[in-house]
Image: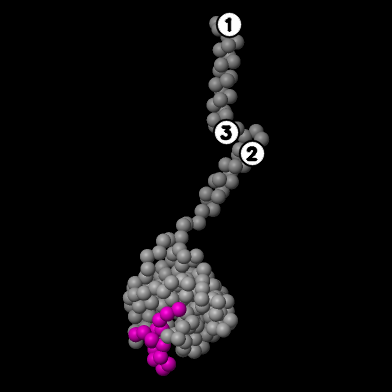
Amino acid sequence: MFRPLALIFGLVSLAPALFATQLDPSHHLIISVRDQKLMLLQNGTKVATYPVSTSKFGLGDFSGRMTTPLGYLAVAKKIGDRAPVGAVFHNRRFTGEILAPNAPGRDPVITRILWLRGLEGQNAHAFRRCIYIHGTPEEKTIGRPASYGCIRMKSSDVAALYNQVPLGAIVQIVPDHLPKVPKAPPAPSSTAFMARDEGTRSQDQPGVTRSTDKATQLLNKRASIVQNSPRA
C-alpha cells in the first residue's frame, strides 16, 4: 500500500535529474482514491484532511485518456497567487471571470492550481497531461470520482491548501484508504501567550505584589499589632 519514506528521500537525491524544483519531503500530500480525500502532512503529522474528486474515468497515466495517475508526484508549479476565490483559469491564465460554487452549466478550472509532475514511470506523463490539484465550481460532486483526470477540490479548501504547500511538496496518490496518522499538536494561541507575558511582567514590575505576598504582609501586620497591644 504505502511504500517507505526512504523512497521519497531517494527521489530527493535524484532531484537534479528528475525535477527542476528542489523536492520538499517535509510537506507530504496523500490522496486516497477509495476515500476521495486528501491528507496534508507536515513533518510526519497530519495537519488537515479535505474531500476531493478524482477521475470518473478511472486510474492510469495514458496519453489521450482522462485518468488519474497513481504513485509519487510533486508540486511543480503553483498558479493563482492573490486571485479571488472562484477565479476562472483558461490555459492557466485568469480570465477575469469569477464563479460561485455550483454555478449552473459551468465546469472550468477555478481559484488555484497546483500543477503536478510525476516522479515515477507509472506517472511520467502527468505534467504533460496537465494533471492539477485545482478548484471546481461543481462542489456538489466533491467526494466522488467526477473529474477528467485532475484532483478537484472546493474553492475554499484549495485556497487553504495552496497557502500551506510549497513548491516541491511530495504528492502520493494511492488506490487504498488513507493511513492513520497522528494529528499535529495545536499551536499555542495568542491569548495564552498574552496571559503568560502579562503574568511575567506583573512579577517583574516594582510596586506590583502577588496575592500570596499580600496575605503574608497582612498576617505580619496583625501579629505586630497583637504583640504591641497593652493586653499582650
Helix, strand or loop at label 2? It is helix
Which residue position holds label 1? Answer: 230
Q: Earlier in the sequence, mark 3 or mark 2?
A: 2
Give, as a three-letter code, the residue at label 3.
Answer: Arg
Label 2 – label 1 distance at C-alpha: 40 Å
* Residue 84 image position (x, y, % from top left): 52, 75
Q: Quadrant of the N terminus?
A: bottom left
Q: Going by the image, does 147 lie left or right of 89?
A: left
Give, as a three-letter code, the residue at label 1.
Answer: Pro
* Image point (51%, 53%), residue name: 188
The segment highlighted magenta reads: 58-72
Comparing marks 2 and 1, which lies closer to the viewer? 2
Which residue position holds label 2? Answer: 204
Helix, strand or loop at label 1? It is loop
* Residue 105 image position (x, y, % from top left): 38, 85
Q: Quadrant of the C terminus?
A: top right
Which residue position holds label 3? Answer: 210
Q: Is residue 54 visible?
A: yes
Mark 3 touches mark 2? (CB < 8 Å): no
Give, as a three-letter code, the residue at label 2.
Answer: Asp
Q: Is residue 13 magenta?
A: no
Q: Residues within 10 Å of mark 2 (few under 14, many from 20)?
A: few
